[in-house]
Amino acid sequence: MNVEINDARLQIIPAIDLKNGKCVRLRQGEMDKTTVFSGSPPTIARQWQSLGAQMLHLIDLDGAFAGTPRNKPVIREVREAIHIPIQLGGGIRSIDTIAEYLTMGIDRVILGTAAYDNRRLLSESCSRFPGRIVVGIDARNGKVAVKGWAEQTPLSANDLARLSEMEGASAIIYTDITRDGMLTGINLRATQQVAQAVSVPVIASGGVATLQDVLEIIPLVKEGVKGVIIGRALYEGTIDLTKALQAVKDLKSL
């Protein structure tokens, strides 16, 4: 399934992060700063779908740190629980893993570390699975971080975005690590710079806390920021998903 994000409306994408089969959130990507929100990720997925979400962002955190998938059974359960598209990342470092997840019914696979240190894999996967490979760029102070955000690299987020587009990535997910899980708002300027560097859609991530944070992203839609991932704010209730979806819809109709 080729999932397009080309609507003039900002797409709001709820996130489920998996650790030991549970739905959790981290602070700034640190595994020892974990909050468990649910022992049943499929139940949470059904909840976000029932409230109107049109896509789910699913991350295997254990896989991201281990470099190989760690939550396949739960990922399968989530896939079977809902019908909306799922984009999945975390520990995906081979063509075989990509193919397995796509066969499972995952709609888009996110390459993070592999996009940085295995350009051949990025190129091959984009060629074999057109429209279904997304690159997740996680940055700290503008520089890409990999291996579960544990390793800092000298490459800029903008440069990796350009390289990813050249290889055929269908979209870029940009996360400012210092904002992630902190409820301090999106790094609008850095997100805008990534969007200006490429022509493929960019999805913003990291730090969304309030409906106002979501609305502040709207002006960037015309520059290519087509979606926003929201995690902790939904779980802690600082954003009501139904109200956020309606607010974005109302703005589009003005």
Image: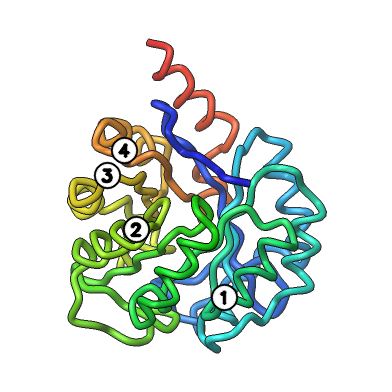
Instruction: State the CA–CA distance, disc 2 to disc 4.
Output: 13 Å
Q: Residue at x 75, y 43 (%)?
A: 83
Of the residues under marks 4 and 1, which one precedes in the sequence?
Answer: 1
Vertical arrangement, residue 105 with respect to residue 55, above or below: below
Q: Nearer the viewer, mark 2 or mark 4?
A: 2
* Residue underneath mark 2: 174
Alpha-carbon neighbours of circle 1 within 10 Å: few (<14), some, or many (≥20)? some
Seen in the image, is 144 located left or right of residue 245?
left
* Residue underneath mark 1: 95
| Contact, mark 3 vs mark 4 (Cβ under 8 Å) | no
Q: Nearer the viewer, mark 4 or mark 1?
A: 1
Query: Callout 3, which amino acid?
Result: Ser
| Contact, mark 2 vs mark 3 (Cβ under 8 Å) | no
Instruction: State the CA–CA distance, disc 2 to disc 3.
Output: 14 Å
> In the rendering, at what x and y percent does residue 174 appear?
34, 58
Identify the secondary structure beneath mark 4: helix
| Contact, mark 2 vs mark 4 (Cβ under 8 Å) | no
Identify the secondary structure beneath mark 3: loop
Q: Which mark is residue 217?
A: 4
Alpha-carbon neighbours of circle 3 within 10 Å: few (<14), some, or many (≥20)? some
Residue 137 vs residue 232, the one in the foreground: 137
Of the residues under marks 3 and 4, which one precedes in the sequence?
Answer: 3
> In the rendering, at what x and y percent does residue 58 appear?
60, 61
Q: Residue at x 51, y 85 (%)?
A: 65
Of the residues under marks 2 and 3, which one precedes in the sequence?
Answer: 2
> In the rendering, at what x and y percent does residue 151 appear?
33, 87
Vertical arrangement, residue 189 with respect to residue 58, above or below: above
